[in-house]
Amino acid sequence: MPEETYQSREERKQAENARQNQQRNQRIPKKKGSLLKKVIIVCLVLGLVSTGAGAISFASMIKDSPNLDASKLVDPLSTKFYDENGNFIYEYGKEKRTKIAYEQVPKVLEQAFIATEDSHFYEHQGIDIKRTAKAIFVNLTGDFGSQGGSTITQQVIKNSFLTPEKTLKRKVQEWDLAYQLEQKYSKHDILMMYLNKIYLGNRAYGVAAAAKSYYGIDANDLKKLTLAQAAMLAGLPQSPNNYDPTKPENKEAATKRRTIVLRSMLRDGYITEKQLQEASKVPVTEGLVPKSTQQSMPYEAFLDAVVKEVKGKLKDVDISKDGLSIYTTLDPKAQDYADKMLNTNEIIAYPDAGFQGAFVFLDTKTGEVRAIGSGRNDYKAEFLGNNFAVDIKRQPGSTFKPIFDYGPAIEDLKWSTAHLINDQNTSYSTGEPISNWDHQYHGMLTIRSALKKSYNIPALLTMREVGMDQAKNFAEKLGITFKDNQVYESYSIGSNTVSPLAMAGAYSAFGNNGNYNKPHFVQKVVLPNGKVVNFTEKSKRVMQDYTAYMVTDMLRTVVNDGTGTTANVLNLDVAGKTGTTNFNAETRAKFGYPTNATNDSWFAGYTPQYTMAVWTGYAQNGNGNYMVANTQKISQYMFKAMMQSFGTDSSRFQEPNSVYRVNNELYIKGVNSAEVPPKPIIKKEKQVSEDGGNGKKQKEEAKQQKEQRKNHQGKGKEKGKGKEKEKH
């Protein structure tokens, strides 16, 4: 065609007129082919650069896209929880939800959300090409999906039909479905799908419910919302928990987020600079109504742990709207009993309201958590809050000795339970002294006897023989983690910090023939599209069967004839260990604590059926916040109560073929030769039992070649370590 008859100028003029018309609030759909062509180009560029799969076709990606199911667009998809047997427990996402029509949404609220979430909402056809291109450019230097570009339409699609995984295929399906949605519904319809669905924190779903929850404004009175309040609500979707203005710790972050929304509204011409300044001066807490104290969710602490586990594995999931079916490991009867034990004095007589307890009760063979205890009174766990059973970290004292000392010694050094350690004057490598709880030295002791009586010096000497690196490696295989990946000699007597969840997982491996199962609260999660995500990990062999059994047999002695007799349960094969930590001299002086005051008291134990790790103590230091005498035994009473109520398996731990027994001591076949251990020699000093002085004395032997011996039973206060925390 001759150049003077070329029609591109007219075409350009028509295109300019079309763009001007699009500035109105009416939608002018583009031809599907034109849009799809652009989408295909974007896909191919992203695929070529990010995945190297330039040959992936658009058609192949969308062929199995879900259909636009109208029912899924109307309401958010609530999450359903089920117990260990698949019985329904609770549906999360139904409460505080109020559906409203477009006519009920005040302009200031609509403008706040559009300016913040999708400033070109009324111009695009479901996909903002420029915004998407920018996001792709940013993503080229990182993981796909690290930079968003989603329109409000895409967010409706993502939250209603697709899985949370960030893949190229899912993104392409999102684009295609967003375009389809724009062809089928009006802009106002799509906007309301979004505004009625989003989670805005404080258990509120949709803007109407949020206005009522935060400001006490009913759905029919939304026009009462101020600019500052509308901007606050519009800033919540990005991170409801972090921007919730009702939480004092969020005040600064919520204020900054609201300012971002106001500046976005100014940028798009919805408000003036003067309006922005006036709204910014309003305190972010102004107009907020008090939170409701009514709790309708059952098993809050347990479901809190469930959600934390789900979020840990499914990073982008939102349980408030993603329509998950979560199959938990919960035993409702055990959890009901655990709640009763913690929150009443009917089972345990607590010394005062401030006394705290936390525990994890799980299946020894599978690692499935059946029940938890997570704080009392003011520290009782709330859903999506602090959870003592999972989050608290306290010094475990002597309960750590099987994990860091004697277990590694049997595993790596092939010691028998009759192996002798010389309990004598010893110091840490730093020069700091270490003592036993009775301030005596006991001469040559078997490791069984040393563990039974919870002496500190033999534990340190055992760990030194093993080596700290080997001890650390053994503990890590049992799920124990260490701050900054560092270990110190004082960890041999439990100066590190752990959670009840971690301790329960570690002890269960001894009871499970040396196989470790990571403790878990979730069996599986079923996504809305039917995809099943299994949470149960494969069992790992972390020690030899002889190690597991020999430690178990020594821990039987602790419960039968040592410091843990209070935790023993008739007709059950119980193995376990006590653990306590003391306050340092400075803390004792500050609060007037007696010298025998205890800071933490633990009991970790197991049967072939269940494992339980219990921590007791006070959340903070304060006048009267310490344990002595019988209060130190509450952890054992809690263990015993749960095991008596739910322990139905009376079988015994089976002795493996890899060991043999002589004089009640265990030896590894082909490695150890049986020796009859000598009696310990005890220096005649001040005698104080681990039970705080209430141990049962044996008769003194008056023969010339022998000295005193004592058998301390039951009521034991360990003085684990002489300091509250080792200084390094």
Image: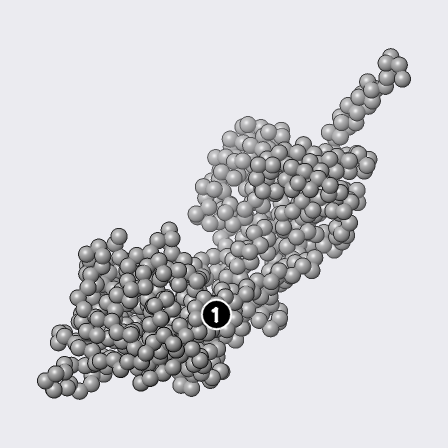
Quadrant position of the N terminus in the picture: top right
Q: Is residue 231 above or below residue 165?
A: above
Q: Residue at x 54, y 48 (%)?
A: 240
Residue 560 image offset from top left, x and y in percent: 33, 82
132 lies left or right of 374: right
Q: In x, y percent, where is residue 339?
A: 46, 71
Q: Is residue 633 above or below residue 149?
A: below
Residue 249, horizontal then vertical, whole percent: 43, 47
Quarter of the image for residue 264 reads top right
Query: Viewer-proximal residue, 403 or 696?
Result: 403
In the image, 248: left or right of 103? left
Q: Secondary structure at mark 1?
A: strand
Residue 391 visible at all = yes
Residue highlighted by disc 1:
515
Task: Give percent across and percent down for residue 64.
Answer: 76, 52
Q: What amino acid type is highlighted by mark number 1?
A: Asn
Question: Which residue lies most toward the front here?
Answer: 670
Q: Nearer the viewer, residue 221 or 369?
A: 369
Q: 161 left or right of 320?
A: right
Quadrant for residue 696, please give it: bottom left
